[in-house]
Image (spheres, helix red, strand yellow):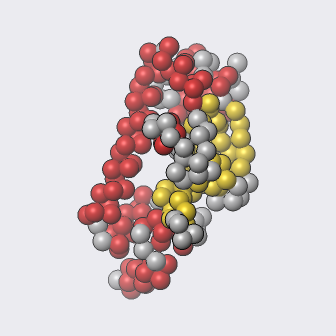
Amino acid sequence: MLEKEKLEVYLKIFKGLKAEDLQKVAPFAKAKSLKKEEVYIKEGEQKKKVAYIKSGLIRVFAVKENGVEVTILLRKEDQFVASHHVLILEEPSRYYYQALEPTELLEFEFDEIEKVLVQNPKFGKVRIYFLRQTLAESLNQLETFVLLSPEERYKEFINKNPDLLNRVPNKYIANLLGITPVSLSRIRKRIADK
């Protein structure tokens, strides 16, 4: 039987399913805690895991040849985190996945959960939802870099993620937006002066 807390989390994740449906995936979930700055997935690893973030924050980043880190993505509570390279392309991860604060996950072995999803048609929508969300987020990020100015990207970021402004160091926000921390300070000053 599912614990009440886990049941509530699963019902939030898998909308449209009933508690009895969720009993099929419950045995595959494992609680995992990450300390601040702990790396969850390293570049080059092939961990076939999907995790639901119950609380906390994960930064996805690459390290360029010159040693400079480039923030690719931020994932927070009520979102999933997984290496898309491993799960979709079946390649080693190209990025590091690091907790920016203490983080609590519900972790699934992808191969185990995949069998359950395939065998139970009710879970088909969950699988499609996950893939659509991943694609939509990637396309949105690409579009913002092509269509928006740095100031517009910053405004969109704070509109969508006001809670992250005090949780993420400025250098990571600037990096995610494709600007320098100095440019971010100038943008913030311009917005404050308006």
Q: Going by the image, does 23 lie left or right of 164?
A: right
The quadrant the N terminus occupies is top right
Q: Is residue 190 visible?
A: yes
Q: Going by the image, does 98 lie left or right of 189?
A: right
Compared with residue 191, is residue 146 higher up or lower down, i.e. above or below? Answer: above
Q: Going by the image, does 158 lie left or right of 95?
A: left
x, y percentage for residue 63? Answer: 55, 63
The image quarter containing residue 190 is: bottom left
Q: Exactly how many numbered labels are in the figure?
A: 0
Compared with residue 44, is residue 128 higher up or lower down, i.e. above or below? Answer: above
Compared with residue 116, is residue 106 higher up or lower down, i.e. above or below? Answer: below
The image quarter containing residue 99 is: bottom right
Compared with residue 100, is residue 29 higher up or lower down, i.e. above or below? Answer: above
Q: Residue at x 70, y 32 (%)?
A: 30
x, y percentage for residue 8? Answer: 61, 31
Q: Residue furthest front?
A: 65
Q: Residue at x 62, y 32 (%)?
A: 108
Q: Residue at x 71, y 58 (%)?
A: 36
The image quarter containing residue 11 is: top right
The quadrant the C terminus occupies is bottom left
x, y percentage for residue 64? Answer: 52, 65
Q: Residue furthest left?
A: 147
x, y percentage for residue 52? Answer: 58, 40
Q: Is residue 192 visible?
A: no
